[in-house]
Image (tube, rainbow, N blue to C red):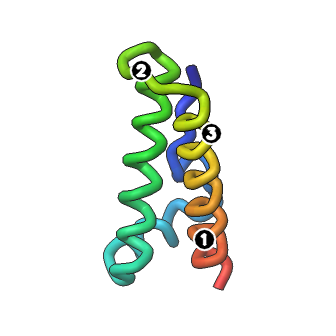
Amino acid sequence: MEKHDLLHEFPEHKEKIHELKISDEHFRKLFDEYHEIEHQIHRINMGSEVANDNFIHELKAKLLFIKDEIYAHLNK
């Protein structure tokens, strides 16, 4: 199962991601939350964790919301 970490999602923004993680506390929180949810979804998909479909759907929706917010930060 493919992982969707931010460096793979936005390879053209690799350096800006690093810069914002250091300089912008809000971005850092978004980054950390994105990765925490992404890893949880990956564990569920790999069978390491069990979750019902509604919970998985909620996680994926939250992940997309955070990803959109991160993308907005990257394009300021």
Amino acid type of disc 3?
A: His
Query: If the image is split into quadrants, where does the N terminus sit?
Result: top right
Q: Position of residue 36 (x, y in %)?
A: 38, 47
- Crowding at label 1, few (<14), some or many (≥20) Cα neighbours within 10 Å? some
Q: Whole-Å distance between the Cαs marked 3 and 2?
A: 13 Å
* Residue at image point 44% right, 46% down: 37
* Residue at image point 40% right, 57% down: 33
- The residue beneath circle 1 is 69
Which callout, 3 or 2, points at the residue further toward the start of the chain? 2
Which callout, 3 or 1, points at the residue further toward the start of the chain? 3
* Residue at image point 53% right, 37% down: 55
Question: In the displayed structure, does residue 17 sit left or right of residue 60?
Answer: left
SS category of the residue bearing label 3: helix
Q: Nearer the viewer, mark 1 or mark 2?
A: 2
Q: Position of residue 64 (x, y in %)?
A: 64, 54
- The residue beneath circle 3 is 57
Amino acid type of disc 2?
A: Val
The quadrant holding residue 53 is: top right
Q: Position of residue 21 (x, y in %)?
A: 37, 71
67, above or below 8, in the image: below
